[in-house]
Image (tube, helix red, strand yellow):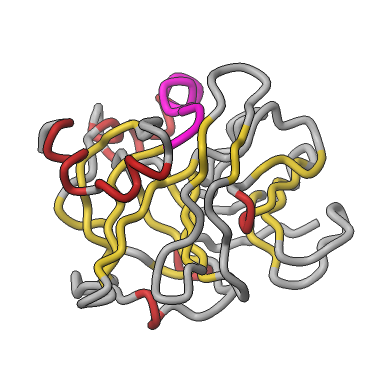
Amino acid sequence: MTAATAVAAAPRVLAETGGSLHTHERAQLTDRQGRPLTAHALRRQETYVFNYPYASTPCFLLRLKEPAPDGLELKPKEGSPYTWPGGVGRDHSVVAFSAICPHQLSFPSAVRSVIDYRRDKSQAAGRAGVIVCCAHGSVYDPTHGARVLGGPAPQPLTTIALEHDPRTDHLYAVGTMGIEVFDQFFSAYRKELNQYYGRGAYREPVSGKAPVETMDRYTRNRIHC
């Protein structure tokens, strides 16, 4: 898919972000068997994971307990501000973010994850309903664009722009917003990613379909703080 086609496929996202959408291949979110995922089938406050926009870059998919408002302007310490489009789905509660912490690139792997969404109270954060990276204590608010609430993170988690089809309730990943850290991630973990995905395959763009699974299936060890 070309950038122009991706933009045409997501007019709402493009309009609501003031043109700050970074286009990537459009991918429909599916279950593990490749069947289209519906927004209402997502359990509230369950952590789901899918890889996008590249084969090795994990993302969080969440259906929050409340709607996520749109129109929020986020201002990274470096880089341009952008307007967050809020949640999607019939109740505007479905959001997605890159699961790579921008502080020092901690991420969920098959072996363990030190970054996770906490539906219950986090000791490090002092509250529930946040994404916490236990590597260095960065805390993000998923209801408001994964803005930084505490810790050393220099910017919000990269937003994964979602498109929702109200007729079918299907979900699509169409791009990103905010500062991307994928090149830094590839450089930091090149050896491990080559071993896990095959040489160079970790940089392959995701297109067509993006399988989604629960965090409990994605990783063997969820570390909470």
Q: Is residue 25 above or below residue 20?
A: below
Residue drawn at point x = 14 percent, y = 53 percent:
208
Q: Left or right? Give the position of 119 relative to 13.
A: right
Report the magenta residues as a range.
Answer: 177-189
64 or 107, nearer to the observer = 64
Give the residue drawn at x 19%, y 75%: 35
Q: Residue at x 43, y 28 (%)?
A: 182
Residue 186 among those drawn in magenta = yes
Q: Is residue 196 visible?
A: no
Residue found at x 26% / y 57%: 210
Name the one closer to the observer, 185 or 173: 173
Q: Quadrant of the N terminus?
A: top left
- Viewer can see residue 41: yes
On the rendered structure, is 157 left or right of 10?
right
Q: Position of residue 9 (x, y in %)?
A: 18, 48
For residue 9, above or below residue 46: above
Question: Percent position (x, y) of residue 103?
Answer: 67, 29
Question: In the image, residue 57 lies at what x, y percent?
Answer: 40, 41
From the top left corner, tell me how far across and down residue 32 is, in percent: 28, 71
Q: Is residue 48 left or right of residue 172?
A: right
Q: Quadrant of the C terminus?
A: bottom right
Which of the two residues, 142 or 219, is positioned nearer the viewer here?
142
